[in-house]
Image (cartoon, helix red, strand yellow):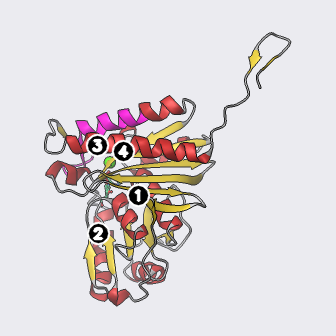
Amino acid sequence: MNSVNPDNRIEREPYVVSGKGYTAVAINVAAKAGEWIKSRQGQVKQLGSKTSAQDLVTEVDKGVEQMIRRLILTHYPDHAILGEEGVEPGAEAAKAALAEGRQHEFLWIVDPIDGTTNFVHGFPFYCVSIALVVKGELAVGVIYDPVRDEMFVAEKGKGAYMHGIPTKVSAETEPGSSLIAMGFPPDRTFAQPMNMAGLQHILPQIRGIRAGGSAALHLAYVAAGRVDGYWEVGLSPWDCAAGVLLVLESGGKVTDTLGNPYDIGTRHLVASNGKIQDFLVNSLQAAEATGFTR
Ligand code: 2AM
Ligand code: CA
């Protein structure tokens, strides 16, 4: 109940929404953003690049991020938002922006389009990724693939779902029977040689590799048991935050490439059904492809 204090100011009780409220907002925002993105496929007008000719951005990325920011702030005006298009390109800027974001109790981490290169080429493998971090811990993760109309949703401690059906990581224990995803961020100086070295070492030992160009969607696919594991060196927080919670809540494991527990600042990531996690981590170490220098 609200009360009037001696200064005649009305003191309002804080309005507390349940965890379900955050998830509902994330789902609605991702659905709306996804529909908009899909409607613009093949109609990109201004193709720009950031750090290099491989690092693309379109007016759709920027417009959709604005749309997502406005919608989240309509519900939660005092929450902080860390979005890819609000940060200068490069690892250092991402680290600084995350350090600022960590100061806030409620931090939304947003990638308006994960898989921009695919979007630009009309290769139908991209998504919207939205995570909510509360006091430094992932609380909600939503990934929406508008092409397949697949909405992946995870809530900390409550499981993960795709269209209401629980998602579960695969049961595969053998690297030789595993299908593994990985990726190549556009940085050719540091990340590319690392990911190439990892690929060279791991590919001969497994059933096959998929490098689809969307870290978030690959993580959703680990959660859904469609691939058995995934790794990538050189990611940013918005590429993986939502997907990490999906994997964890689907019974999988996520670490950095040295095997340390995931943190929202982790840039070199390994995620799997848990059973092949050690194989991936050990292989990257053997290939000197962890992205960490000794
Ligand atoms: P994006 O499409 O949102 O840019 C490719 O395997 C992955 O790398 C994608 O998830 C892609 O996300 C991401 N990526 C692209 N540019 C990046 C950059 N400059 N730094 C880190 N990750 C990037
Ligand atoms: Ca993006």
Q: Amino acid at mark 1?
A: His
Whether residue 64 appears in magenta in the rendering, the answer is yes
Residue, disc 1: 163
Q: Amino acid at mark 4?
A: Ala
What is the distance, in whole Å, between disc 2 and disc 1 at their CAs? 38 Å
Residue, disc 2: 193
| N-terminal-most mark, 1 or 3 | 3
Would residue 187 appear left or right of 15 to someone viewing this image? left
Residue, disc 4: 31
The answer to which of 210 and 87 lies nearer the viewer is 210
Q: Amino acid at mark 3?
A: Glu
Q: Tell me if label 4 and label 2 are in contact, CB under 8 Å.
A: no
Would residue 71 appear left or right of 47 to someone viewing this image? right
What is the distance, in whole Å, between disc 1 and disc 3 at their CAs? 16 Å
Local SS, label 2: helix
What is the distance, in whole Å, between disc 4 and disc 3 at their CAs? 6 Å
Residue bounds of the magenta highlight = 50-69
Instruction: Choose mark 1 or mark 3, whichever is in front.
Output: 1
